[in-house]
Image (tube, rainbow, N blue to C red):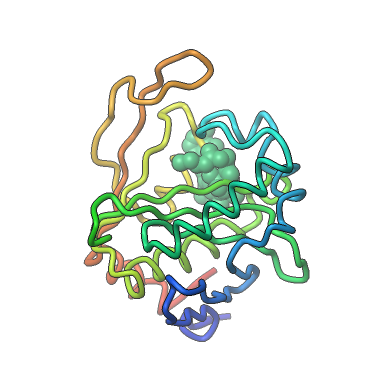
Amino acid sequence: MRVSVEEKHQVVTSDWKQTLPVLTGRCVRLRELRVSDAPTLFSMLTTREVSRFISPPPTTVDGFERFIEWTHRERAEGRHVCFAVVPEGMDSAIGIFQLRQLEPTFTTAEWGFAIGAPYWGTGVFMDAARLVVEFALETVGVHRLEARAAVANGRGNGALAKIGAVREAVLRQSFLRHGEYLDQALWSIVKDDWRQTKAVWGSIIH
Ligand SMILES: CC(C)(COP(=O)(O)OP(=O)(O)OC[C@H]1O[C@@H](n2cnc3c(N)ncnc32)[C@H](O)[C@@H]1OP(=O)(O)O)[C@@H](O)C(=O)NCCC(=O)NCCS
């Protein structure tokens, strides 16, 4: 069946510094984090497989609550956006997508993401990622969206390639994790690339 992306992906524009809009995809909803998301985020994002290649997540439920409150303050200041990933039929967050400005106008930004391992390979990533990229480029005003992924992080790099990001460089020994300096790949999406990718998705998704 051919399905128009425009029909299925709903991106709502709002004053995101006041409160984040709810973005609705085919199988996920993205919304502002709630302090009540802390227990599920703690159980989903602190496992070894999820946290292996990312900055260390909080180590307690309280720590996640403080992180969530911090994201609200950063959003209000217009520096940072953090969406909760909520699969269809659920109420709690099973992952997050973050977007942070790399300079004060937010035209260059960096994104990062983590999803609970039970949801890997389910389509949740792609659905959420499309919504976040669209939100960044069309609502926040980002022109260039960067991501860094440890070279050894197969799924992270595979996911970025799949969303249409371009691998630009290797940042040697740029990330200290578990006492070891890791090389990272630098990926980017620029607005013109995205328009072309969307044109392809607009004709068919599968
Ligand atoms: C990154 C993350 C959000 C991606 O979500 P996901 O559901 O695993 O992603 P998907 O399965 O949709 O896509 C990953 C792709 O990488 C591919 N892949 C998996 N292992 C791979 C490897 N070792 N080398 C290359 N590609 C690999 C998968 O086959 C898949 O591509 P396909 O759908 O064409 O088969 C999730 O894996 C995660 O939360 N990881 C832990 C946190 C993290 O590393 N975040 C990224 C920081 S940049």
Q: Which of 126 and 135 lies nearest the eye of the viewer? A: 135
Give coordinates of residue 185: x percent, y percent: 34, 34
Q: Does residue 194 appear to the left or right of 12 in the view shown?
A: left
Residue found farthest to the top: 179
Going 48% across and 68% down the picture, which residue do you hit?
A: 131
Residue 41: x and y, percent? 69, 48
Q: In which quarter of the image is ligand 1?
A: top right
Residue 52 location, x and y as percent?
Answer: 58, 28
> With respect to residue 152, does 190 lie above or below?
below
Q: Residue at position x 75%, y 50% from top?
A: 40
| Location of residue 203 (image quadrant) | bottom left
Q: Is residue 40 above or below residue 49?
A: below
Residue 75 visible: yes
Q: Can residue 156 be seen in this view?
A: no
Q: Specify the quadrant that holds the N terminus.
A: bottom right
Q: Quadrant of residue 183?
A: top left
As drawn, is 151 to the left or to the right of 84?
left
Q: Is residue 202 above or below residue 110?
A: below
Q: Residue at x 25, y 65 (%)?
A: 191
105 or 124, nearer to the observer: 105
Q: Which residue is drawn at 61% across and 59% down?
A: 124
Compared with 27, 111 (above or below) is: above
